[in-house]
Image: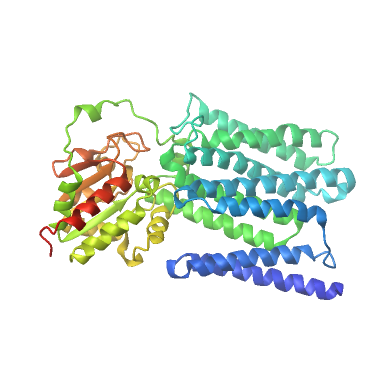
Amino acid sequence: MNPQLTDVFCKLAYLLATALFIFSLHWMSEVKTSRRGVFAGSFAMLLAVAATWVSNGSPKFYLWLVIPIIPAIVIGVWLSMVPLTAVPQRTALSHAFGGLAAGLVGTAKFYYWYGHEQNQLTKFIVTAIILEVILGFLTFTGSLIAAGKLQEIKWIPQRPWIYKGQNLVNLGAIGLALLLGVMVIMNPTSAWAPWVFGLLIIPLALNFGWMLVLPIGGADMPTVISILNAYAGLSAVAMGFVLDNKLLITAGALDGSSGLILSIIMCKAMNRSFTNVLFGAFGQVQSAGGKAEQKSYKSATAEDAAQILESSSSVVIIPGYGMAVAQAQHKVRELHDLLTKRGIDVRFAIHPVAGRMPGHMNVLLAEADIPYDKLIEMDDINGDMPQTDVALVIGANDVTNPVARHDKSSPIYGMPIIDADKAKNVMVIKRSMNPGFAGIDNELYYLDKTLMLFGDAKAFVADVVKELSGGGGMGH
């Protein structure tokens, strides 16, 4: 191929890929166009890889590139087949791989140029390399810890792992890495630069990643995933400057900015700041652990729940991570259909941080083919809760806890919640009275109007469906 034509092809391909990446994000913002957004983003990436492959003048068959690509594709397809309940940890793994790739590319470029073309190591390029490596490697280890927490791996604590002076240690580690980075930037071709780069900066970045995430409790994982997504995007931006690849800069900027915006939305939904999420150890078990045994609550059977549901006119179902773990979304759909056929108005209240990642509940309910217009955001449905006959909470804990409104000592104080307690009747499907990820009792469970329905969410909803299917009842 003519070199000039190749250059034109690459530029046009990059331009088209950039446009497709932007449209992909736009289409992903709505359910009805989200599938189109996925295909657009995938095609854009394929186009970008193809254009980069031939950018050096002519397409060549690089066996040394194909050999690792083939097993990577196999592993990628295998990882994509996880159940929807495992999508959060799967997403965290993707961030880990992206961060590792950026860190390795930056490392390779630094050592190659140091040994062969030291004139390439300008202060600007070395600055980009330092940022790429620090962000990439801290994203790698941080995302691995996040994935482990989400997967509930036994040797990774689910609650915050904290000790006295921890924030000072963490900030000191990243501060030292940045200080050493400045030293390398000012003297990139000195004899000690590669030693400081490889033996100090990289280990400090790797260490800071897990140190950053390990103290964060499970309740903050949605926000942490978004922040790690932003870090991965920023490391890709830096890599784009290092490789002089404009598409990589654009794609990384889109990734980083979207992750940052999503993090802001998540923090707003919890009425908290970035610093509080990253350094507040939200999710720490409070000392008053005996309250659940001292308070009284009322429990009920599936038959009781079915009778209450079929005698109601309006039902709001509030899903949470417990529904996801039990994979109860399809049984919930059956319950929705049965109640709807009886003329009962059934809607779903969606809290922005319910589950383990942004949009987790929306994805699960969409998989069960529940009409999207029945999924109502928290702000839109809270005004209707006082007129709701039954609020059915399925595996949602902290996002329905009234303590967020009045207890200033609570770690979730000020967090907007779904006003389940304002419904005329409340039923909660839960395995036990154990607290949620924030480690605090839910006042909702002890109200006179609340009935606790103990058991696996999928099995219990199935029993309710069975009761509703088998026995006529009052009807509508």
The one of 377 and 188 positioned closer to us in this rendering: 377
Looking at the image, the residue that sits furthest to the left is 474
- Can you say which quadrant of the picture contains the C terminus? bottom left
Residue 373 in picture, x, y percent from top left: 33, 67
Q: Which of 203 and 468 is in front in this view?
A: 468
Q: Position of residue 250 (x, y in %)?
A: 64, 62
On-image quarter of the N terminus: bottom right
Q: Where is residue 109 in the image (x, y as percent from the top left)?
A: 79, 48
Residue furthest out toward the right? 116
**149, above or below 331, in the image:** above
Q: Residue at x 82, y 33 (%)?
A: 192
- Residue found at the far top of this picture: 164
Does residue 126 appear in the picture of this structure? yes
Image position of 426 (left or right of 474): right
Query: Foreground: 407 or 55?
Result: 55
In the visual, does 252 lie left or right of 219? right
| 130 shown above or below 337 | above
| Residue at image coords 80%, 49% | 122
Name which quarter of the figure residue 49 lies in. bottom right
Is residue 396 in sight in this rendering?
no
- Number of marks drawn: 0
Q: In this view, does 206 lie to the left or right of 243?
A: left
User: Closer to the camera, 236 or 420?
Assistant: 420
Q: Which colour scheme is used?
A: rainbow
From the top left corner, tell me how far across and down residue 362 is, in percent: 39, 58
Left or right: where does residue 139 sit relative to residue 425? right
